[in-house]
Amino acid sequence: MALQKILLEGEAISAGKEKRILPSLEVNHWDRLHFHISAGTASIADISVRVLFGTPVGSKILLSDSTVWYEGATPTEREFSHSTPSTYNGTGFIMSVPVVAPLLYDIILKNNSTEDKPEVYVTVMGQEI
């Protein structure tokens, strides 16, 4: 079973604003998700991305954007977020995160720039290990 999906296709994000994608995809078949965040041919500087996983419990969904990883002597928290600096010249990046709950609940993009981003794209690909 393959997962490859376009979540956001060329949509604008105004300066200082957030865009929530809210795909609510069942992802428990995959070990990792790879998010490609791009501005097409423009720079994707000054953008923040946060990934939220969810676990259904009755009529509620418990949300998390991090995991505490127990490997070695000291547990470490790994947050599922990334921000590009204003000096970033790349047109995109790929953010790879482990699947830690049954649902990919939300991807939150925030344009931290003083200028609008006219075209933003987000895709996701699932990987079985």
Image (cartoon, rainbow, N blue to C red):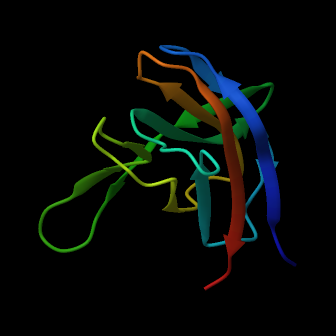
Please provide percent x and percent y for residue 107: 62, 38
Residue 7 appears at what percent x and percent y? 78, 46
Work out whether 90 lies above or below 4. above
Image location of residue 30, percent across then percent down? 69, 71
Lateral position of residue 56 relative to residue 51, left or right: right
Which residue extends farthest bottom? Answer: 129
Tell me if residue 22 can be seen: no
Q: Is residue 3 visible in the rendered structure shown here?
A: yes
Residue 24 position (above or below residue 102):
above
What is the x, y in percent for residue 36?
A: 61, 58
Q: Residue at x 69, y 45 (%)?
A: 121
Q: Is residue 55 left or right of residue 88?
A: right
Residue depicted at 72% across the width and 48% down the height: 103
Residue at the extreme front of the image, as rendered: 41
Q: Residue at x 55, y 57 (%)?
A: 100
- The residue drawn where x is 71% and y is 55% is 123
Front position in the image: 50 or 110: 110
For the N terminus, give its image quadrant: bottom right
Q: Is residue 16 left or right of residue 12?
A: left
Which residue extends farthest right? 1
- Residue 108 occupies quadrant: top right
**Total label count?**
0
Task: Work out whether residue 102 or residue 89 is closer to the camera in this orientation and state it.
Answer: 89
Left or right: residue 77 versus residue 66 is left
For the C terminus, the image quarter is bottom right
Instruction: From this view, report whether residue 15 is shown above or below residue 82.
Output: above
The image quadrant that residue 56 belongs to is top right
